[in-house]
Amino acid sequence: MLEVSLITVGVVLTLAALAYRYITRNDFYFADKAIPFMKPTFALGNLGPLVLKKRNILEHFKILYDSFPDAKVFGIFNLTEPLYMVRDPEMAKKIAVKDFDHFVDHTGMTGASEAVENSHMLVTNTLVALRGNKWRDMRATLSPAFTGSKMRQMFTLIAECGQSMVEFYQDKTRSEGPQVVEMKELFSRFANDVIATAAFGLKVDSFKEQNNEFYTLGKSVSQPTG
C-alpha cells in the first residue's frame, strides 16, 4: 500500500513538474534576446488583470504600452505566448509596409483549424481574421474601394452622417431637455448610416427613422447566434 502511494506521489510530482516546465518554457524568451519585457506571472503572463476582470482591455494595454517609454520595442506575454509590442512609429511603418511580406498573418482570432478557416462565420471572413491566399484575394477585392480620391469622398459622407446625428440630438435636447444616451446604440446607428451611405450609396437616417430596414437587417446579421 505504501509502495503504491509513493508511486502515485511520484507520478503526480512528475506531471506537476512537466506542467510547470511547459507553462514557463517561454519565460526567458526576451531575456535571451536582450529585449526589455514585462515579467510574466505564472500561467497568466501579463494578462492577469484582464483575466481577473480588474481592468478593461484598452486600459490594460495602455498601461503596458506606457511601461517602457524609452524602448522602441518590448516584450509581453499573452498567457504563455511571447508577443512583441512596438512603440517606434518608424518600426511600425516598416512592419506594415516595407517588410510586410514577413508579417502577413494576424494571430488567429478563433483558432487555426481548417474547419474554422473555411467557415462562413462573419468574423472569420474579415481582413483581420483571414490568412494567406484568402487574405490576399479579399484585399485585392477591397483595395480599389479605398483609393485616395474615394477615401476623401467617404470622409465627406462620414462628416455628413455625423452632422445629422449631432443635429438630431440638438433638436431632441431643445424639445425634451437633457438626454441620457446609450453610447453603444448611438454609435451602432451612426456606423449603420456611414456604411449605408459610403458603401451602398443609400441615404439612411437611423436616428430619425429608428426602425429603418437597412438598420434592422444589419443588426440581425451582426447578432451572434447559436
Image (cartoon, rainbow, N blue to C red):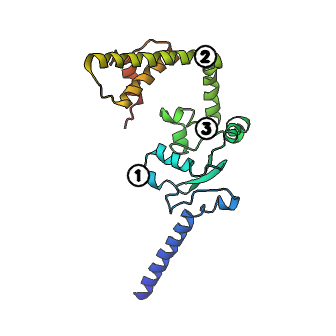
Label 2: state its secondary structure.
Answer: helix
Of residues 99 and 17, the one nearer the viewer is: 99
User: Residue drawn at (68%, 62%), measured in percent from left and top?
Assistant: 32
Q: On the picture, is 31 further left or further right than 165?
A: right
Vertical comparison of 28 with 141: above or below? below
Q: Amino acid at mark 3?
A: Arg
User: How packed is label 3: few (under 14 Cα within 10 Å), some, or many (20 or more)?
Assistant: many
Q: Which residue is mark 3?
A: 131
- Among the 4 quarters of the image, the one containing residue 89: top right
Give x and y (percent) for residue 106: 60, 41
| Quadrant of the rendering where the C terminus is positioned | top left
In the image, residue 183 sits, relative to residue 60, either above or below, namely above
Q: Is residue 177 above or below residue 65?
A: above
Q: Residue 54's mark? A: 1
Of callouts 1 and 2, the N-terminal one: 1
Secondary element at image label 1: loop
Please tell me in which quadrant of the rendered image residue 224 appears.
top left
Amino acid beneath label 2 = Lys
The residue positioned farthest toward the right in the image shown: 98
- At horizontal 27% and vertical 21% (from top left) the residue drawn is 177
Residue 198: x %, y % from top left: 52, 17
Residue type indicated by callout 1: Lys
The image's mark for residue 150 is 2
